[in-house]
Amino acid sequence: MGYQELPDSGLTHRIHYMNRKEVTGQRRLSRLKAMFAVAAAVLALIFSAGGASASTTGAMSPFTSQAEQAGLTATQTAALQNQVDRYLAQTSKKQVAANVIDLGGRRLMFVALPGEAHPRDMTNGALVDHCALPVDYGYFCAYSGQNFTGSSIPMWKCALWRIPWTANGSWVNNQTTGTVANFLDDSGVSRWNDGGAFNFDEDAPWYWVHWIKNC
């Protein structure tokens, strides 16, 4: 029989211990890598959201600056823009100033700051609200509020004008004497007329009026 060396039990124990330690270390390393991956993903989402927010703010900056120059606070500016956004959603038209919407064909809507009786002049007279009292001659003016208050639509061109309001408002017909304004429902049918200029109504229900043909 040849000589056979018996294994050193102490050495074997140390080897097994080192193997277990190596496996444990690899598991910890894997967990750390997973944690770093999750953290990186969260940071990416945060920076992405921040970039989108900055982009939106940048898009609003011309109107925001205009509102600030008119003396509005940041809270008032946000409230005004929210009001403008609601009208834009209803009319699908274009904002051309901090409180002015182009309804198409040089037809404008002037938006009042929530809580104020009349729209402010935020364009230094470049865009004139002919519905600022007294109403300029030649215009039919529709107001979102009663007693000739709130947002206003100065109607001068003979056309169909969209009314985006549903609560009680008011109107003034100061067009050429005898010019009749027709009030149309959602089907475009004239349901009532004002009998001709000069005329007015300080408490007019807009809930059924979807269009006005001012002449």
Image (cartoon, rainbow, N blue to C red):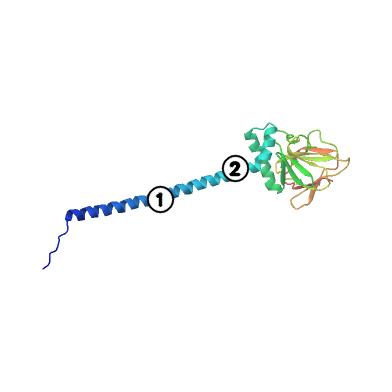
**196 or 97, which is in the foreground?**
97
Residue 180 point in image, percent of width and height: 85, 44
Image quadrant of residue 178?
A: top right
- Can see residue 199? yes
Q: Which mark is residue 182?
A: none
Residue 78 point in image, percent of width and height: 63, 38
The N terminus lies in quadrant: bottom left
**18 or 54, which is in the foreground?**
18
Residue depicted at 37% across the width and 52% down the height: 30
Q: Residue furthest top?
A: 71
Horizontally, residue 113 falls left or right of residue 133, namely: left
Residue bearing mark 1: 33
**48 or 137, which is in the foreground?**
48
**54 or 128, which is in the foreground?**
54
Image quadrant of residue 203?
A: top right
Residue depicted at 65% across the width and 41% down the height: 60
Residue depicted at 68% across the width and 40% down the height: 62
Q: Residue furthest front?
A: 2
Between the residue at mark 1 and the residue at mark 2, the CA separation in whole angstroms equals 32 Å
Q: Residue furthest right?
A: 177
State which mark lies toward you, 1 or 2.
Answer: 1
- Amino acid type, label 2: Ala
Callout 1: helix, strand or loop?
helix
- Can see residue 113? no
Q: Residues within 10 Å of mark 1 (few under 14, many from 20)?
A: few
Between disc 1 and disc 2, whose residue precedes?
1
Residue bearing mark 2: 54
- Amino acid type, label 1: Lys
Q: Residues within 10 Å of mark 2 (few under 14, many from 20)?
A: few
